[in-house]
Amino acid sequence: MTAIPDVRTAVTLPNAVPVRNRAGRVSTLVVLGVFAVLFALPLYVMVVTSLKSMDEIRLGHIFALPMHPTLEAWDIAWNRAASGFTNTGLKSGFWNSVLILVPSLAMSVAISSICGYALAFWRVRMGNMLLSLLLVCAFIPFPIIMYPLIKMTVAVKLYNTSFGVSVVHTVLALPILTMIFRNFFSSIPEDLIKAARIDGGRFLGTFFHIILPLSPNILVVVAIMQITGIWNDFLVGLTFGNVQAYPMTVNLNNITQTQTGVRTYNVYMAAALLTAIPPLVIYFISGKLFIRGITAGAMKG
């Protein structure tokens, strides 16, 4: 006679979590929470300082909430803060940044995506050498090539113009963006390209009708990278732009460095937040697509 096994010991509750796993989750949440607080603390100080008056700031309680919140510092930073020789605030710099960003984003994405497509699927003469050259160019520091770029933009009469700043941003971004597009396009089955060629598809026709519809994630990744890099740039805008074409970051530097007398820290904080808001908004809107594009092969070799 065989003994009947006791099945009660084999039954586990579906929602039961082992003690070890539960402790690991708690410790992970604690560590992530600590790091989140450390990263968010400077932002909190900036926000609350921008909402305080100077009399309240002089009390020295930087972590305290504003007793009488006011948006006056934001209004001054946007409309009336002294930026170099003008008192127009960040408003003019915002539109200058937009005029620099839009053409640079369009040119860099268009050129680098077509180059990456050609290097991924078409037999390009000396293609491997070109890839190696792009890899080297992607890591050349900007100050090394600054003077040659100045001479070139002066020769074609683009120096001291907003479009010239856009062209320089495009040139600097082409190596790394071409590598990113090439690596992503290489993950697309080559049979699709061969079928398009058999059906009479030409170079650009295949690119626009087959490759681009399969690449929304990588386009979002590259767009966010370019928007963040161009909007936060200071050195290129300062070097290749003029007073009327300075981007928002240069105006921010002028506001914080050229004022005399009382240091209006609430205006400084409001100006810094106004400068950082546009790329943050774009990232939060399309952040899921950014992560999805990276995991789909945007950064894979």
Image (cartoon, rainbow, N blue to C red):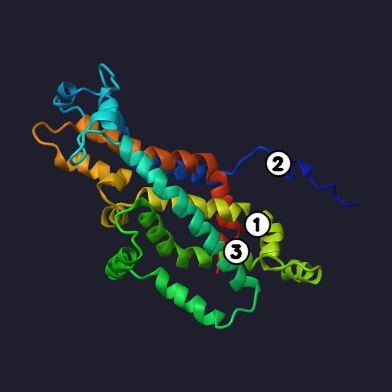
Toward the viewer: 212 or 48? 212
Residue 52 falls left or right of residue 141: left
Residue 210 in sight in this render: yes
Toward the viewer: 109 or 7? 109
Toward the viewer: 154 or 267? 154
Residue 211 falls left or right of residue 244: right
Q: Tell me the distance, in whole angstroms, between the alpha carbons under discs 1 and 2.
A: 50 Å
Residue 50 in sight in this render: no
Looking at marks 3 and 1 on the same chain, the residue that comes earlier in the sequence is marked by 3
Residue 170 falls left or right of residue 158: right
Please tell me in which quadrant of the rendered image residue 86 appears: top left
**Which image quarter holds the C terminus?**
bottom right
Looking at marks 3 and 2 on the same chain, the residue that comes earlier in the sequence is marked by 2
Looking at marks 1 and 2 on the same chain, the residue that comes earlier in the sequence is marked by 2
Q: Residues within 10 Å of mark 2 (few under 14, many from 20)?
A: few
Tag shown at residue 184: 3
Which circle, 1 or 2, is nearer the viewer?
Answer: 1
Which circle, 3 or 1, is nearer the viewer?
Answer: 1
Q: Residue at x 30, y 22 (%)?
A: 71
Q: Tell me the distance, in whole angstroms, between the alpha carbons under discs 3 and 1.
A: 12 Å
Secondary element at image label 2: loop
Secondary element at image label 3: helix
Q: Residue furthest right?
A: 1
In the rendered image, which residue does mark 2 sit on? 12
Amino acid at the residue labelled 1:
Leu
Toward the viewer: 260 or 170? 170
